[in-house]
Image: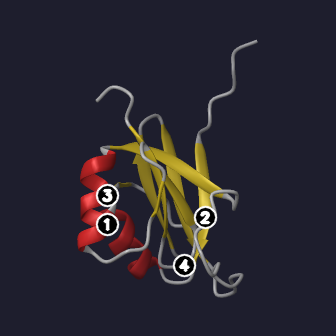
Amino acid sequence: MKNPVLHHASICVADVARAREFYETVLGFAPIPRPDFGFPGMWYGLGEGQLHLIQRDQRSPAPARINPSDPHFAVTVDVPGMRAKLKDLGLDVLDAGDQMWVLDPDGNTVELRQDPTS
């Protein structure tokens, strides 16, 4: 049997427009086409997988601090370049060398890992 491959992960956001600003402008994610499901959302292509943002009115309170043991997803990036960008934007980061964690505007934890090919 073939190993399963992750197709997508989805996270809830309170405001898709605000989340788009973070994921596209800060992290550099590229949007991909999304069918009209009758509720707001956004899809991003990440390598062979996808990240789906789903707008929901009710969200759990955002965490008070970044905690790598909270539910999260991870993407590979140029960590030194991203570290500098996040610092310039004044965003809080939990830094562990070749990986770091940041919260999106809705308090979702995003892990940023050094791309092993760079």
Residues 33 and 20: in front is 20
Instruction: Kindly identify the amino acid type of the residue bearing the numbered disc 1.
Output: Leu
Q: In the image, residue 49 lies at what x, y percent?
A: 50, 40
Disc 4 packing (10 Å; few <14; some 14–19; many ≥20): some
Identify the secondary structure beneath mark 4.
loop
Q: Do the residues labelled 4 and 2 touch (CB within 8 Å)?
A: yes
| Residue 31 visible in the shown view | yes
Q: What element carries label 1?
A: helix
Decide if residue 59 is on the left or right side of residue 99: right
User: Real-space Cα distance between discs 3 and 4?
Assistant: 20 Å
Name above or below for residue 116 compared with residue 103: above
Q: In which quarter of the image is the N terminus?
A: top right
Q: Say whether disc 4 or disc 1 marks the residue closer to the N-terminus.
A: 1
Which residue matches tag 3?
A: 83
Residue furthest to the top: 1
Q: Name the residue under label 4.
A: 106
Residue for badge 2: 11
Marks 4 and 1 sit apart, C-alpha to C-alpha, by 16 Å
Mark 3 packing: few (<14 Cα in 10 Å), some, or many (20+)? some
Q: Residues within 10 Å of mark 1 (few under 14, many from 20)?
A: some
Q: Would you name the residue on which mark 1 appears?
A: 86
State the SS at label 3. Answer: helix
In front of the other: label 4 or label 2?
Answer: 4
Answer with mark 4 or mark 2, whichever residue precedes in sequence.
Answer: 2
**Residue plotted at (43% across, 74% down):** 19
Q: Can residue 38 be seen in this view?
A: no
